[in-house]
Image: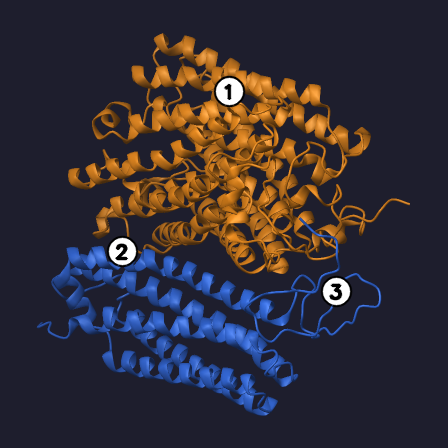
Chain colours: A blue, B orange
Amino acid sequence: MSDGHAHAEHFPGRTHMPPVHVEGVPGAPHAHHPKLQHHFDNMPQQAEASTLGMWVFLVTEIMFFGGLFMAYLIYRQANPEGFAEASHHLNVFWGALNTIVLIVSSLTMALGVRAAQTSAPPKTQVFWIVVTMMFGATFLGIKAIEYADKFRLNHVPGPNFHWEGQHAAAAQMFYSLYFCMTGLHAIHMIIGLGIMTVIATMAWKRQFDADYYTPVEVAGLYWHFVDIVWIFLFPLLYLIGGHFVE
Amino acid sequence: METLNYLNNGHGAASWLLTRDHKRIALLYLVSITAFFAIGGLFAFMIRLELLTPAGDVMTADTYNKMFTMHGVVMVFFFLIPSIPAVLGNFLIPIMIGAKDLAFPRVNLLSWYIYILGGAFTLVAALSGGVDTGWTFYTPYSTAAANSHVITAAMGVFITGFSSILTGLNFIVTVHRMRAPGLTWFRLPLFVWSMYATSLIFILGTPVIAITVLLVAAERGLHMGIFDPALGGDPILFQHLFWFYSHPAVYIMILPAMGVISEIVQAFTRKNIFGYSFVAFSSLAIAIIGFLVWGHHLFVSGQSVYAGLMFSLLSFMVAIPSAVKVFNWTATIYKGSVQLDSSMLYAFGFIGLFTIGGLTGLFLAAVGLDVHIHDTYFVIAHFHYIMVGGAIMGYMGGLHYWWPKMSGRMYSEGWAKLAAGLIFVGFNLTFFPQFILGYLGMPRRYHAYPPEFQVFNVASTLGATVLAVGYALPLVYFIHSIFYGEKAPADPWGAKGLEWEIPSPPPTENFVVTPIVTHGTHQYAPSKEVGIV
């Protein structure tokens, strides 16, 4: 297998090869990037592993939310009118505003990745990440207003659920799904804010430049994914009651 | 002075509990999985003790319900699913592909801690009174009726699921991005192929069971109505979501074992596998088709007859790639220089028992016949032939095959052969009578039964005792070998593959110099099959 010679790494098709070095051979040149972990051969391999890892993780997230979307699909198909009636009681204005907030936050996130990629000064990198976080916090604030409203109206599933309309059972099912789906989404937003705090701190410490920006990129992938989930949640939950007549 | 290897490179608890070395993490898993195997075995022992007599005399019906539930939960989620991937896969994948470690060593350690946390939840549920829903957590019983620790146990399953997800993610990225130069996909050992297929199920299936048990907990704890018919929910949806993961989970158990058997069969027949690419692709085929068969668990649950027919057809289809493997192993053994080492005995055991388990699976996949044997001991016997006769045989075979590499020591071959024999005899004595019991109509999950079934139940309990001795023996001689065993050479079996070219036990970094691979890893004989590399 191993031909025994101290070969240099040779990866056809890979560009940006670092200077040749061989582990464990005395006197071999050590041209490590300080961020290169010991088990990777070079920086591109490390970056590719991290981004692939995040993409695979996002696949698992799709399957995770997929179970809920499946439940939504089946119950809406079984109770189309009840779902429309329940959806009618959600506030489209807050939902639409939150959609805009998240889309803009995706833009600022992308600008944050761009800033790291182009070796922009740490201040610029931190600025875009903090702005992204502020949009994320705004989203959660609006969500809290909406939740409070539902608690006030007793639209929260459980023993105290109260419904004035015709389809009380279907409405309770709708709100069960509403709270599970948006709640799970909100938990992902909170985790995202935690990740962004770490990324902002790292950026402030001048850790990112054109040679090493994988953490920002990977965190960005996560952020965009959470946004996309909302892009599906908004029409499915808020907009199906438009034609409902009381 | 002893040469530096991964075992003596660092001492003390912290050097193990904070390690990022995939080999040490594999050993952490080995120890914890063995503990859960013993716990699950204890529950099984209680079940077999109760069934020794027709009357329910050892425990109440409620206690019995908790016993089989905890047996199922512990064995499925905390032993079988992590067994080969987390121990042998963790240890071997980086070495087999010529890498220094998995792509994400810290995530690897994290997944062990998540596993332990999930296990702690389950043990708390067990010690504080147990769960009685069956390992399947069927609604509405689990959400509306059960008066036991459902949420705690469900959280244990939920948490440990993330351990599986992270392990699968790590393996996929590692196989894609960490292969040594020259190690193309069709030069990979078949064990790596099967672990890759398993990882696909980990990442695509496990999140679905995670959200499903989360919804059960939400329905039970927060009165969110998702599955409860009283709230307009549909309990059948739970069954669909549950089996969407839990049937592929069976392939999580069996695919790694198949990978192990492919390696052992080649090593102890001195032949390259017959039809490498067929065996490799059959792993992927099992993983993919395995996602489309879950409905065969719902034939009598009120699922549409037409859906039942489709699921029946698809279930029959998954037998094809499984049979490809059995035929190819057999063809490999044919005219090989067969050596009956203990690992090979396990491989023979696997091939025979898996065949019986697979063929009886076809009985259950037939819509009409399933109505008769559904929820009887026939089902119990069938899936124990797959999970115990298949998955655990493969796990034991793999442990014996790679133990010299992992520990650097040789174990007693005589005792190992005795244990393999005891396990084979004990297993068949335990579970074959259950096929008959089931066909005669004994339902599963009851603590009492009519007296005419007693003779088969006594045989089954007797077999379980032999089986327990068979499983206890390796624990003794493996531990003995660590202290008194002969030092293992790099390649004690004359086997081929990158893992046999580095010292036993391997150095922490596996390879001092990244190897450059110029041919397939299986070079038992220069044959025409080498052409596929």
Q: Position of residue B186 (x, y in %)?
A: 51, 49
Q: Position of residue B213 (x, y in %)?
A: 39, 49
Q: Nearer the viewer, mark 1 or mark 3?
A: 3
Q: Secondary structure at mark 3?
A: loop
Front residue of this view, candidates A195 and A109: A109
Q: Is residue A175 above or below residue B387?
A: below
Left or right: B339 with respect to B306? right
The answer to whether residue B428 is seen in the rendering is yes
What residue did someone put label 3 on? A22
Q: Nearer the viewer, mark 3 or mark 2?
A: 3
Would you identify the image quadrant in which residue B494 lies?
top right
The residue marked by circle 3 belongs to what chain? A
Q: Amino acid at mark 2?
A: Ala
Q: Amino acid at mark 1?
A: Phe
Q: Position of residue B222 (x, y in %)?
A: 36, 56
Q: Amino acid at mark 3?
A: Val
Q: Which mark is residue B427?
A: 1
Local crowd size for mark 1, using a 10 Å CA cut-off: few (<14), some (14–19), many (≥20): many
Q: Secondary structure at mark 2?
A: helix
Left or right: B182 with respect to A164? right
Q: Which mark is residue B497?
A: none
- Give the spatial CA distance, label 3 vs label 2: 54 Å
Look at the image and tell me in which quarter the N terminus of chain B lies: top right
The residue marked by circle 1 belongs to what chain? B
Closer to the chain start, of discs 3 and 2, is 3
Residue at left 57%, top 74%?
A15
What residue did someone put label 2 on? A71
Would you identify the image quadrant in which residue B311 lies?
top left
